[in-house]
Image (cartoon, rainbow, N blue to C red):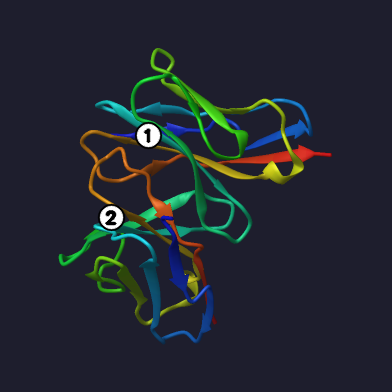
Amino acid sequence: AQSVAQPEDQVNVAEGNPLTVKCTYSVSGNPYLFWYVQYPNRGLQFLLKYITGDNLVKGSYGFEAEFNKSQTSFHLKKPSALVSDSALYFCAVRDDYGQNFVFGPGTRLSVLP
Amino acid sequence: GAVVSQHPSWVICKSGTSVKIECRSLDFQATTMFWYRQFPKQSLMLMATSNEGSKATYEQGVEKDKFLINHASLTLSTLTVTSAHPEDSSFYICSAQTSTASYNEQFFGPGTRLTVL
């Protein structure tokens, strides 16, 4: 069965500093990995995904994520955080066999001015 | 592109009444739609998966007679909460997908906040 862990409930970072939001996963087959962001009282917005190919994936709003097969991780990164990046971030995984997404518990990112 | 809308965005109803939530894919055809429930400060819980023209597949523990899902067309799915009770109060989010391929991302609606008095 698929599972996703986001080990940090909360990440605080100063504006302008690099940020990392961690995600590890477990799947049976090839992993398809996704990051979504949720602003208060809103639905989820797609940021980026990894299917195959280059391990470094670039997405929306300057975010990127690095797929590491040996560590089964897909950490979300951004070189320079903005206050407007403050939101709830969800990592999700799906494999070849499953139709359904499995979401991680979410990490709340606070970027301090 | 890939916009999903939900209506209403919020609804307050009395206990015992039924509430219908619509989910529409505005600029694409969605072969598959998903319904999620999100509790405060928690992740999304998948309730059911619906494919156009067929019965929805419900996750374990979700009452299919209480949460009626209809995916009548490639652009519309509805969730009806029947005989709603205060414990059904939650944030309901739908998503849509253009095909059944596993590598396709889901596009999410803005959510519907249901409050049952």
Residue, x 24% and y 40% (percent of image)? A98
10 Å neighbourhood of mark 1: few (<14), some, or many (≥20)? some
Badge 1 marks a residue whose secondary structure is strand
Nearer to the camera, B92 or A1: B92
Q: Nearer the viewer, residue B3 or B93?
A: B3
Q: CA distance from mark 1 to mark 2?
A: 16 Å
Depicted A22 relative to depicted A44: above or below: above
- Direction from residue A22 to residue B20 in the image, left or right: left
Image vertical order of residue B51 relative to residue B12, above or below:
above
Residue B2: quarter of image: bottom left
Residue at x-position 72% and y-position 40%: A110
The amino acid beneath tag 1 is: Ser
**Horizontal and vertical percent for residue A29?**
24, 26
Q: Is residue A58 left or right of residue A83?
A: left
Q: Mark 1 highlights which residue?
A: A3
Residue occupying image coordinates x 23% and y 33%: A96
| Label 2: few (<14), some (14–19) or many (≥20) C-alpha neighbours in 10 Å | few
When the figure is inspected, residue A4 is found, relative to residue A66, above or below; the finding is: below
**Which chain contains the residue that carries disc 1?**
A
Q: Residue at x 29, y 59 (%)?
A: B30
Q: Quadrant of the N terminus of chain B?
A: bottom left
Question: Residue placed farthest to the top in the image?
Answer: A70
Corner quadrant of residue B76: bottom left
Residue A12 x/y as whole percent:
73, 34
Q: In the displayed orientation, state which residue is furthest to the left.
A: B54
Residue B59: assigned label:
2
**Residue A23, position in %: x, y?**
50, 29
User: Which quadrant is home to the C terminus of chain B?
Assistant: bottom right
